[in-house]
Image: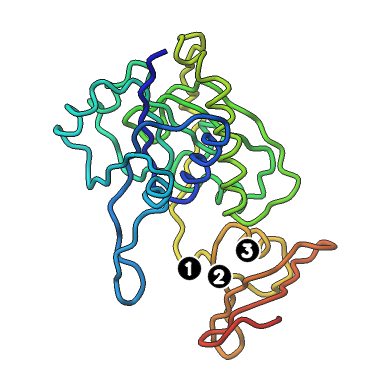
């Protein structure tokens, strides 16, 4: 088959997906990601993880502020798009280009957890019956028809970065194993049950704070969900938790970074 494909994505979960599809023998022909962003105190421009991956793997890429008419005219002969955490709404005339559709991986059993933080939200809700959805993208947020879903039972939560990698691996396998049937139109897309939709939020730094007593389950879930969970000590200093575990029904903190200091044992 004459397949010409484009991948759109930006953060680490997109890289995890690309790495897995590569291991499974498939690479996209073109990658589109967001422009470099200022990073750190010096505001040094830093490329997205996807741009770094594309450069390393010598795959053609574009960094765009937005999808424009010039791009649309240049990619008319591409016939399959895949979007994972690109971070921007795509215009309908872009979504309509590929003959075989614009696919999207969402790490939840849609219509549950539509929005920007499905994995974090599942962790915070301790929702261990979850899954991944391979869908056709439309202009509404996580609204398009479902092609395939895979249910997943979580035994215990790990850090969000590890869970993202896990979902990316599952999504890559779903995509590769079903790609031929999708292209041959052997999989019928089904409309989501929109009346059952639930939505998740974009979390802020204040959501990452742990509360006394520190050993409770909710604090462990926050530790897993967020990259820099913290608690405020009796001196009103912020302490970032860098290593912890759930053991014997207790959240056990092992290492912290006290405000203005180096990492140490708790």
Image quadrant of residue 153? top right
Q: Residue at x 31, y 30 (%)?
A: 139
The residue sitting at the bottom extreme is 235
Name the residue tied to disc 3. Answer: 223
Relative image position of residue 237 (x, y in whole percent): 54, 86
Instruction: Judge left or right: residue 250 versus residue 53.
Output: right
Q: Is residue 204 above or below residue 196?
A: below
Label whose residue precedes the other's in the sequence (3 or 1):
1
Name the residue tied to disc 1. Answer: 206
Instruction: Judge left or right: residue 1 versus residue 218.
Output: left
Please tell me how crowded label 3 is: few (under 14), some (14-19), or many (20+) other residues with Cα within 10 Å. many
Q: Which mark is residue 209?
A: 2
Most foreground residue, 164 or 179: 179
**Does dot 1 land on a helix, a strand or a loop?**
helix
Q: Which mark is residue 136?
A: none
Relative image position of residue 202 (x, y in whole percent): 43, 53
CA distance separating discs 1 and 2: 6 Å
Q: Residue at x 44, y 22 (%)?
A: 145
């Amino acid at each position: 088959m004459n397949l010409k494909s484009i991948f759109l994505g930006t953060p680490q979960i997109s890289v995890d997906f690309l790495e897995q599809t590569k291991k499974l023998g498939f690479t996209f022909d073109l990658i589109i990601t967001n422009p470099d962003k200022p990073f750190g105190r010096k505001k040094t421009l830093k490329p997205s993880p996807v741009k770094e991956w594309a450069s390393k793997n010598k795959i053609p890429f574009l960094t765009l502020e937005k999808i424009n008419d010039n791009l649309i005219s240049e990619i008319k002969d591409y016939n399959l798009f895949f979007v994972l955490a690109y971070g921007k709404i795509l215009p309908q005339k872009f979504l309509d280009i590929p003959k075989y559709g614009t696919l999207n991986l969402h790490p939840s059993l849609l219509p549950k957890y539509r929005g920007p933080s499905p994995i974090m939200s599942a962790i915070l809700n301790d929702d261990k019956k979850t899954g991944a959805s391979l869908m056709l993208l439309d202009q509404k947020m996580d609204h398009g028809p479902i092609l395939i879903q895979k249910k997943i039972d979580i035994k215990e939560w790990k850090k969000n970065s590890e869970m993202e990698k896990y979902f990316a691996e599952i999504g890559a396998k779903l995509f590769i194993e079903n790609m031929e049937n999708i292209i041959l139109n052997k999989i019928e897309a089904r409309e989501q049950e929109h009346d059952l939709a639930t939505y998740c939020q974009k979390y802020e730094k204040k959501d990452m704070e742990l509360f006394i007593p520190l050993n409770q389950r909710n604090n462990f879930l926050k530790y897993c969900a967020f990259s820099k969970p913290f608690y405020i000590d009796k001196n009103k200093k912020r302490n970032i938790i860098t290593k912890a575990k759930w053991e014997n029904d207790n959240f056990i903190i092992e290492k912290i970074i006290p405000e203005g200091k180096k990492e140490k044992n708790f």
